[in-house]
Amino acid sequence: MRKLLLLVTTLFLFTGCSLFEPSHEMEKNAEELVSDGSSAFAAGDYKDAVKAYTDLKDWYPFSKYAILAELKIADSHFHLEEYDEAILGYEEFEKMHPKNDAIPYVIYQTGLCWFKQLDTVDRDSSPARNSLTQFNRLINQFPENEYAKKAEKNIKECVANISGHELYVANFYMKTKKYKAALKRYEYIVEHYPGSEESKESLNKISKCRTLANKK
């Protein structure tokens, strides 16, 4: 009897605590979670949408809705202006599903995440360059796609931002009397952005800049 009591006590010590812990089982099925996510997304409750779609992806990874969840999580981050998370989501989606019909949209959204971070020309031009890379890739891979046509509208702004930044740096070098560095920048602008306002200004400054550079 004592041995039986000792055995029961030991078992309770190892398992008894779990009897009082809340269940971690998912109470909703995949259809309910996708419904929750879709409703939250449509209402603009993107944090709730992320939660519902993440639960769907984690609990039902082989569901027919799992791919949709991956895409909607990235979209929700985009609408929350959490662009780093959105980019990671879109890039992971493309990596995992390279033949999916949504890939043109995914590339466009990746570019748009960078595009939304464009700053003034005196700041880092990396967002414009990264955005331009994605938009050009989209146009090259899917030239007839509707998102490629949308991308074309943003490319001019990307190029203007990049060339504006290059001119800003060139003018800074000119003001600080680093004429050789300035000359390289002016010549680069003329070569890579012909016909732009930045190119015209660079052309007007190249002769003077070259003269000053040769004197040093």
Image (cartoon, helix red, strand yellow):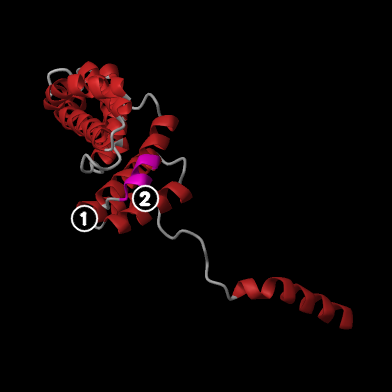
Specify whether 16 is left or right of 214: right
Mark sitting earlier along the chain (2/1): 1
Total numbered circles: 2
Q: Amino acid at mark 2?
A: Tyr
Q: Which one is in front, 45 or 26?
A: 45
Residue furthest out toward the bottom: 2
Q: Secondary structure at mark 1?
A: loop
Q: Which one is in front, 180 or 28?
A: 180
Q: Secondary structure at mark 2?
A: helix
Answer above or below: position of 89 versus 35.
above
Q: Is residue 83 magenta?
A: yes
Estimate how packed mark 2 is, as few (under 14), some (14 to 19) or many (20 or more) residues with alpha carbons within 10 Å: many
Q: Is residue 92 visible?
A: yes
Q: Amino acid at mark 1?
A: Gly
Residue furthest out toward the front: 215
Q: Is residue 94 magenta?
A: no
Q: Which one is in front, 143 or 176?
A: 176
The residue singled out by tag 2 in the image is 53
The residue singled out by tag 1 in the image is 44
Quarter occupied by the C terminus = top left
User: Can you tell which quarter of the image residue 202 is in?
Assistant: top left
